[in-house]
Amino acid sequence: MAKDMNMNMALFMAQSGACFYCGCEFEGRALPGKKHLHGWSKDHVKPLCKGNNAVRNSVLACLSCNAEKKDREPTRQEFERAQRIWTGALRYLKAFNGNAPPMLKG
């Protein structure tokens, strides 16, 4: 593993390597041009098209769920679960990097 953990790694660990929506176990990274059903991609819990590009608005989802969700607003349960995942991701960042990135402090 790299010396410093990045946000994608922290989210992956906080989500136990599984899709935020359906819980399927990821089988690699989704790369442009290579669509793998259970590869992961970053998803905005609150749709980006509605103006929410906050750092705390990201989770990892399989390609199938990410495509199916489109610009749907999250349920209250999804939003609350996303917040718990972010708390876990921040713990991983602090443990591996010694502190949270400046944009996440506060």
Image: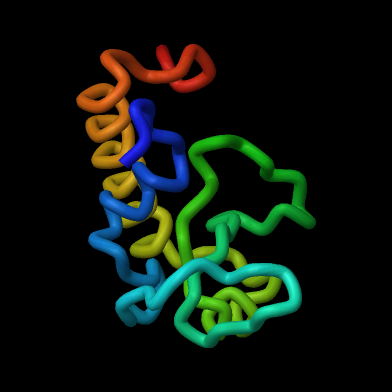
Q: On the rendered structure, is 11 left or right of 34?
A: left
Q: On the rendered structure, is 1 left or right of 58?
A: left
**Residue 96 at x, y percent in the picture:** 26, 27
Q: Is residue 83 above or below residue 55?
A: below
Q: On the rendered structure, is 39 left or right of 90?
A: right
Residue 64 position by quadrant: bottom right
Check the image and tell me how it is coloured.
Answer: rainbow
**Residue 77 at x, y percent in the picture:** 34, 63
Q: Is residue 36 above or below residue 105?
A: below
Q: On the rendered structure, is 95 left or right of 36?
A: left
Q: Residue drawn 68% across and 75% down?
A: 70
Nearer to us in this view, 39 or 106: 39
Q: Residue drawn 39% across and 46% down?
A: 9
Classify the position of the C terminus by image quarter: top left
Q: Residue drawn 35% across and 54% down?
A: 12
**Residue 39 at x, y percent in the picture:** 49, 75
Q: Residue drawn 31% across and 41% down?
A: 1
Nearer to us in this view, 105 or 77: 105
Residue 86 position by quadrant: top left
Question: So how many labels did they put on this image?
Answer: 0
Residue 99 position by quadrant: top left
Q: Is residue 72 above or below residue 67?
A: above
